[in-house]
């Protein structure tokens, strides 16, 4: 033992930093809850065939609707299937990128001491 009052080497300065980190973490948690609600309400559109097919998903990748142009129907089932698949992937990728960006914005100010 090196002396009285040393404890575990966690002085008042560290306690203050830790308290501030918990406060920031709580703010992030509240922001994440709001973000989750926003993402559920968002409509993100993916498309293919120059707009012949549009797939709309929420910010959480929940499918909302598919819009198919009458011109796309003339392409036949196989082409139509491919167009829908491409539009779905486009919507998914855009939704994932949006979610990632929003989460990075939310957590950018969070700095935990000692980590």
Image (spheres, rainbow, N blue to C red):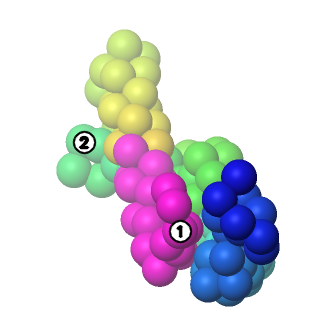
Q: Which residue does the numbered mark 1 point to in the structure image?
A: 113
Q: Quadrant of residue 32?
A: bottom right
Say which residue appears at 70% left-offset and 66% top-offset.
Answer: 3
Residue 95 in the magenta stretch? The answer is: yes
Where is residue 64 drawn, in percent x and y? 66, 52
Label 2 Cα neighbours within 10 Å, binned few <14 / some 14-19 / many ≥20:
some
First in residue order: circle 1 vs circle 2: 2
SS class of the residue under badge 1? loop
User: In the rendered view, does 113 fall on the left or right side of 75?
Assistant: right
Say which residue appears at 40% left-offset and 36% top-offset.
Answer: 89
Q: 11 above or below 103?
A: below
Label 1 Cα neighbours within 10 Å, binned few <14 / some 14-19 / many ≥20:
few
Q: Is residue 55 visible?
A: yes
What label sits on residue 94 in the rendered view?
none
User: In the rendered view, does 17 fall on the left or right side of 90?
Assistant: right
Magenta range is 93-115
Q: Which residue does the numbered mark 2 point to in the structure image?
A: 49
């Amino acid at each position: 033992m090196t002396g009285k009052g040393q404890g575990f080497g966690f002085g008042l300065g560290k306690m203050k930093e830790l308290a501030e980190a918990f406060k920031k973490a709580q703010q992030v948690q509240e922001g994440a809850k709001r973000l989750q609600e926003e993402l559920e309400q968002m409509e993100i559109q993916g498309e293919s065939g120059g707009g012949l097919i549009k797939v709309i998903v929420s910010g959480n990748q929940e499918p909302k609707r598919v819009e198919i142009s009458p011109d796309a129907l003339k392409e036949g089932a196989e082409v139509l299937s491919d167009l829908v698949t491409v539009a779905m992937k486009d919507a998914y990728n855009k939704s994932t990128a949006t979610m990632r960006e929003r989460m990075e914005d939310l957590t950018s100010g969070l700095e935990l001491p000692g980590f």
